[in-house]
Image (cartoon, grey):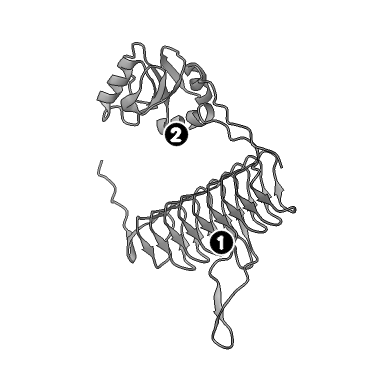
């Protein structure tokens, strides 16, 4: 098994290069970007972002005096910059994330750690990273550029799409709590043969469990992000671009539509549906299905009606 090489940081780019990569307009002086910083600590060469220049005008002014590089919202007047630089973008926060990822996050080295245990029948792409003490079971398929961190357990037949991230101590594809009674009234476990399919660019957080389906797979759609300490039970079907935040519990056979947001410490009871773009609030207990674009809060959760349109 291949060893893992050390990480190598990237050299910071010129501001003009960043502007070109974002399809954005640069204002002020071009300069080398040497790192990133929060707005209130941005110095010369540091890249930062501002969402509301009016609200944070004092911090913006201070960053300009220091000569920082600011990702600025398009449509807002750019102030006098002096030695500073501004790059006008539609979404400064998203642009900051993209630039940080592309230029300042050391690339994850491909390879399999010496302490990892990989079943002979598993297929792991050559560009994937498998961390220390991770266990990958029979007939698992790991796609290109997947990062699997340390102490992860991936059970038999799991499929993980390319570009995905599995954080440390996650468990994917072991049985859910499928229990019935034998003729003597004792609890017996139902076999779980469906395993799990994770789409492309998905994330599974630390200490999160994604349980195997009983007959068909538990499915997580492309670009869906699952936070730390989340439980996804057997037979759950999660759509694309969903966010499931910390300590949420999704019971068996729940269906979650595309771009839904599941709040921290929330619970969705078995067999329910959460519609596309729906929002489940912090600590909500969902006892009835939620429609598309609906917002539900409370225990038991109730729908929050949409606000009336503002008079012109």
* Residue labelled with disc 1: 211
User: x%, y% of residue 189?
Assistant: 58, 74
Query: Residue at position x 56%, y 50% from top?
Result: 151
Q: Residues within 10 Å of mark 1 (few under 14, many from 20)?
A: many
Front residue (pair 122, 232): 122
Residues at circles 1 and 2 in contact by the CB criterion of under 8 Å: no
Cα separation between marks 1 and 2: 32 Å
User: x%, y% of residue 95?
Assistant: 45, 30
* Residue labelled with disc 2: 94
User: x%, y% of residue 44?
Assistant: 38, 16
Name the residue furthest bottom. Answer: 184
Left or right of 44, for residue 227: right
Say which label, 1 or 2, has the lower sequence index.
2
Q: Quadrant of residue 46?
A: top left
For residue 182, above or below residue 48: below
Q: SS for tag 2?
A: helix
Q: Quadrant of the N terminus?
A: top right
């Amino acid at each position: 098994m291949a060893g893992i090489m050390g990480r190598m940081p990237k050299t910071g780019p010129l501001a003009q290069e960043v502007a070109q990569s974002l399809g954005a307009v640069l204002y002020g002086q071009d300069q080398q970007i040497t790192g990133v910083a929060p707005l209130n600590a941005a110095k010369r060469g540091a890249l930062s972002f501002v969402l509301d220049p009016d609200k944070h005008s004092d911090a913006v002014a201070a960053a300009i005096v220091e000569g920082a590089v600011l990702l600025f919202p398009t449509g807002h007047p750019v102030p006098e910059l002096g030695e500073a630089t501004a790059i006008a973008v539609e979404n400064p926060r998203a642009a900051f994330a993209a630039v940080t990822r592309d230029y300042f996050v050391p690339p994850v080295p491909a390879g399999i750690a010496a302490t990892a245990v990989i079943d002979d029948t598993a297929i792991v792409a050559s560009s994937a990273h498998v961390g220390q003490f991770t266990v990958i079971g029979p007939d698992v398929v790991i796609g290109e550029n997947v990062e699997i961190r340390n102490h992860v357990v991936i059970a038999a037949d799991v499929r993980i799409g390319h570009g995905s991230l599995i954080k440390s101590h996650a468990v994917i594809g072991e049985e859910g709590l499928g229990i019935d009674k034998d003729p003597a009234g004792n609890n017996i476990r139902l076999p779980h043969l469906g395993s799990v399919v994770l789409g492309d660019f998905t994330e599974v957080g630390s200490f999160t469990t994604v349980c195997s389906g009983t007959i068909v797979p538990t499915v997580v759609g492309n670009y869906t992000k699952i936070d730390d300490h989340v439980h996804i039970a057997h037979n759950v079907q999660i759509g694309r671009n969903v966010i499931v935040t910390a300590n949420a519990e999704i019971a068996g056979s729940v269906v979650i539509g595309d771009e839904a947001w599941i709040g921290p410490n929330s619970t969705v009871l078995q067999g329910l549906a959460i519609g596309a773009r729906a929002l489940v609030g912090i600590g909500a207990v969902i006892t009835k299905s939620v429609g598309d674009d609906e917002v539900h809060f409370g225990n038991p959760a109730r729908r929050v009606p949409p606000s009336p349109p503002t008079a012109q």
